[in-house]
Every structure is written in C-alpha cells, then in structure tokens.
Amino acid sequence: MASLESTLRKLSRAYVSMEAKGANLTLIAKRRSAVRIGVESLDSEWHGGVFPYPHETIVIAKEVLRDCLPSIEAQLAKARKGSAQHTLNERRLDALNLAIASLEERLSLEGEP
C-alpha cells in the first residue's frame, strides 16, 4: 500500500503544479481520485473501517486503475532489471493490481463481476 500512497502523493503534487500552469486537469484528477479510492479500499479491507463510495464510483475507479497498467508495464519493460526504477514500477504494478482486486471484490459482493 505504501507504493500506492506514494503514487497518490506524486499525483497530488503534479495536480498542484499543473493547476498553477493552467493545464488541463481532467486526466490527472481522474487518476488521483482512482488511486485515492484504491488506497482507501485496501486500507478498509486490511484494517477495517468505512468505505463510503457508491457502486458507480467504484466501477470508474477500477477502470481508471486498469487503464494505468499498460503504461506501467511499458515502463517496467524499459527499466534495467534490479534498478531502482524497475523495483519502483514492480511495486507500483503489484499495488495497482491489489487495489483493482479489492475494488472488484467489493463489486462482486454487490453482485457485479
């Protein structure tokens, strides 16, 4: 989960930076929201607590996280095995897959695969 929290911090810094430049924030806002929901899903699953998101929000977050996978897989393929960048992307990929699985589990409990 630390990898996802790190990703969330990175996205939040990028959002602030892009906002100051007047750039389009739609994509980064979607990703930041999806990663936050993924972190909260894992935290709720592992440590208990409330997970207040409605069905449609979970579906969107799951798809946004899933859409991030090819980019990270491509970065992983380019990074030299054993390098810090390779390790970072391996962990990020694992964390995203865990978050996606957690969100899918929540949806399956509601009756959607």
Image (spheres, rainbow, N blue to C red):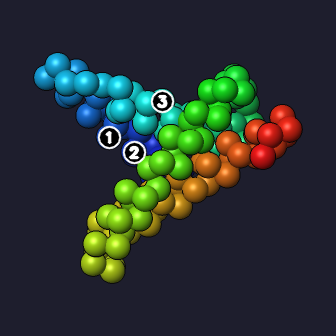
Q: Which residue corresponds to the image point at 26% horizontal and 34% vertical from the top-left?
A: 14
- Position of residue 29 relative to residue 85, above or below, is above
Q: Which residue carries the number 1 mark?
A: 10
Q: CA distance from mark 1 to mark 3?
A: 12 Å
The image quarter in which residue 16 lies: top left
Question: Residue 78: image x %, image y %?
Answer: 28, 72
Q: Earlier in the sequence, mark 1 or mark 3?
A: 1
- Position of residue 18 relative to residue 72, above or below, is above
Secondary structure beneath disc 2? helix
Question: Residue 17: image x %, image y %?
Answer: 20, 28
Q: Given contact means CB atoms under 8 Å apart, are the residues at marks 2 and 3 in contact? A: no
Q: Which residue carries the number 3 mark?
A: 33
Q: Which residue corresponds to the image point at 35% horizontal and 33% vertical from the top-left?
A: 28
In the image, which is nearer the foreground, mark 2 or mark 3?
3
Q: Given contact means CB atoms under 8 Å apart, are the residues at marks 1 and 2 in contact? A: yes
The mark tally for this picture is 3
